[in-house]
Every structure is written in C-alpha cells, then in structure tokens.
Image (tube, helix red, strand yellow):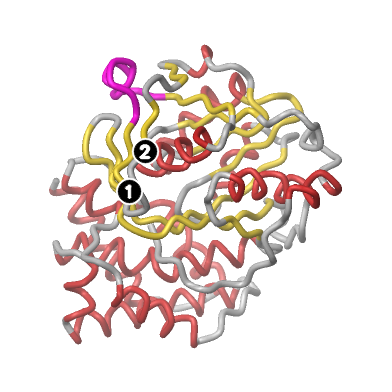
C-alpha cells in the first residue's frame, strides 16, 4: 500500500483520446472491455466493484470467499459512500472464467507462482494483463508466462482492508498509476493499452493517470513501501505511531533515502524532496495498518521477495550499500522464521 502523493504523470486520458489512439491489441474496439479480477481481496474487490458500478463487465476470481460471496454478495464500506454487488459474476477456477480483454492481477506477490495456471485461461489472445501488485519486477513474472501479450503495471495508491469474507473497508485514497512493461526496462512512453485502461478506470470514478516510465513509478512507490510495510511489522504498530516517534520516523527517512540511491543506480533519478512529501502525507494519514502488517497478524506469507529481496539484489549488482534496508530485511526474515 502507499499514499497518494504527487508523482510524475500525464493528464487524464479522455474517452475520445482512448478511441483515437487505442489501435492495437484489440483495445480499440468500440464494445466495452471485459475485465477479470484475479484475487478479490481489498484491492481487487474495491477496484472491481468500482468498475462494475460504472457498467463494465467484470468477472471475479475468488478462493476462500467464494461460497460467502455467492450467498451474500460483495460489499465495500467506503469513506466516499458504501456500495455493493448483490450478485457479482464470480468463479472458483480460472478455467471457468470467460476470456477477458483486461486481466487485473490483484493477488499478493507471494502467489505469483500460480500465474502460469491463472493467466492463460483468463486473457484474450489480444488482451492485456494489468499487474496491480507491490514490489519490483512483477511485470516480468507475467511476461514470462505470456511473452506475446501486453503487460501493464498498475500502482494502487489505496488505503483499504479486507475486514471479512466479501467485505472491504475503504479508508482513504484510491488513485491508480498505469505504465507499460518493456523487457529491457526502458520507458514505454504513452501507449494505446495504457490510455484505454486508464479511460476505463477514470470512467469508474477511479483517478487513473499514466506513467511513461513504469520502472521509475515502481521505485517511487517502493520509497514508501520499503520502510512502512516492514517497520510496521517490526515495531508492531500503525503508521501514525511510527511518525509520532522521532527515532522511528528518522529510521523510515533513512530507508527512503537508500531506496532513492538504488533507483539512481538503475538510472531513475528521484528528487530528494519526494521523501519529505511522502513523510508529510503519511503524517496526515489516519492510523493505518499496511498490508504486510495485516498479513503478519493473519499468519500469512510476507511479500519479502518483491519488496525487499529484489531491490536489494539490484543494489548489490550496482555496488550500492543499503545498511538500513538490509537490517530491516534481516529482521523481517527472522520474524517470518519465528512465526
């Protein structure tokens, strides 16, 4: 999870612009695009329900919540007004999903080993995959399964928790940044697929902006995710407690600056003022449990590979020392081993 700060973006794409530019991968068709939500937790449930209420044809893949949602529907308790889907189109198996134009992967990255079984049955031959996960290198995970498909990254700036089967509590924010994956890590620029998906999200009342450099956007999100996900687990507290204590706040700032150093080594310069802006926005947030703390409390696997191991591997390859991040990662590995 992250906070909605001002990051590099382009103006909202209009529906007219999307129709004008979306001429590849089947995204130019006038018929509404069909969406699959792979992983109907807090993130997938919230965005999928928003898209549904905007008239989008949305199909939800569920696991443990399937029977409950089939009987009781999907409900979102939101600061912007509650909404629900009494009879969502739900499936217990990816092989039962209709093939969709856009497949949004909203699973935890700890489940990406399942992508070879989940993605091929769900996506159209000319469709796209939207990886709505935290961490680094996750689009490459999808590209390894579907090398000929367009892979987008969706960065969700959302404060939401799943509070029960089919029940989601939306606390704050909700914007999405969308970029396109390139195998060599180069910026993709503005592409038809990005414009089309962003238009669908904006039409659903989800502020969606497009990023010409997905890797840069990923590093900016890691500036928040690396310190606050891990520190909340280690300290056993919410974000407001970290911010109120000068020592833990300073520790978070040190970690954030180390993330900037790794990003710079990969050719992605982030201005130092970005750290101050994120700290200020975090201080304004309501008391919040990041997703990693919730996973820890529920005894679920922690997303250590995508959020910590991969960035640290990038740092090591570049010869960048990151003592604060390495110490935090070591503590999280120890906590995971003891749980």
User: Does 251 sit left or right of 132 as displayed?
Assistant: left
User: Does 153 sit left or right of 108 as displayed?
Assistant: right
**Label 1 packing within 10 angstroms: few (<14), some (14-19), many (20+):** some
Identity of the residue drawn at 77% across and 61% down = 189
Is label 2 in contact with label 1 (beta carbons under 8 Å)? Answer: yes
The correct choice, above or below, for 286 with respect to 111 in the image is: below
- Give the magenta part as a residue range: 62-74
Q: Earlier in the sequence, mark 2 or mark 1?
A: 1
The question of residue 69 being in magenta is answered with: yes
Question: What is the quadrant of residue 177 in the picture?
Answer: bottom right
Residue tagged 1: 78
Residue tagged 2: 83
**Label 2 packing within 10 angstroms: few (<14), some (14-19), many (20+):** some
* Residue 190 in picture, x, y percent from top left: 77, 58
The correct choice, above or below, for 325 with respect to 176 in the image is: below
* Residue 10 in picture, x, y percent from top left: 69, 66
Identity of the residue drawn at 51% across and 33% down = 52
């Amino acid at each position: 999870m992250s906070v909605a700060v001002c990051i590099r973006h382009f103006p909202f794409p209009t529906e007219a612009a999307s129709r004008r530019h979306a001429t590849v991968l089947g995204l130019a068709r006038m018929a509404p695009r069909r969406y699959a939500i792979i992983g109907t937790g807090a993130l997938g449930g919230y965005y999928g329900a928003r898209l549904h209420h905007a008239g989008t044809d949305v199909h939800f893949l569920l696991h443990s919540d399937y029977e409950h949602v089939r009987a009781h529907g999907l409900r979102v308790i939101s600061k912007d007004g509650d909404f629900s889907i009494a009879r969502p189109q739900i499936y217990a198996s990816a092989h039962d999903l209709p093939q969709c134009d856009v497949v949004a992967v909203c699973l935890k990255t700890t489940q990406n080993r399942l992508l070879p079984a989940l993605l091929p049955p769900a996506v159209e031959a000319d469709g796209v995959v939207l990886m709505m996960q935290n961490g680094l290198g996750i689009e490459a995970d999808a590209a390894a399964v579907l090398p000929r498909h367009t892979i987008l990254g969706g960065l969700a700036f959302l404060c939401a928790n799943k509070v029960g089967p089919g029940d989601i509590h939306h606390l704050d924010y909700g914007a999405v940044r969308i970029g396109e994956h390139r195998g060599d890590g180069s910026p993709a620029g503005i592409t038809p697929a990005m414009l089309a998906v962003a238009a669908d999200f904006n039409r659903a009342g989800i502020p969606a902006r497009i990023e010409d450099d997905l890797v840069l956007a990923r590093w900016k999100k890691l500036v928040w995710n690396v310190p606050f996900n891990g520190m909340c687990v280690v300290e056993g507290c919410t974000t407001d407690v970290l911010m109120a204590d000068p020592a833990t706040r300073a520790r978070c700032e040190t970690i954030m600056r180390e993330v900037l150093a790794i990003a710079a080594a990969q050719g992605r310069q982030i201005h130092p003022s970005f750290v101050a802006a994120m700290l200020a926005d975090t201080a304004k947030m309501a008391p919040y449990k990041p997703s990693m703390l919730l996973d820890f409390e529920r005894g679920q696997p922690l997303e250590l590979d995508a959020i910590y191991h991969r960035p640290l591997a990038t740092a090591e390859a570049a010869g960048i020392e990151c003592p604060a991040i390495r110490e935090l990662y070591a503590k999280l590995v120890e906590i995971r081993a003891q749980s």
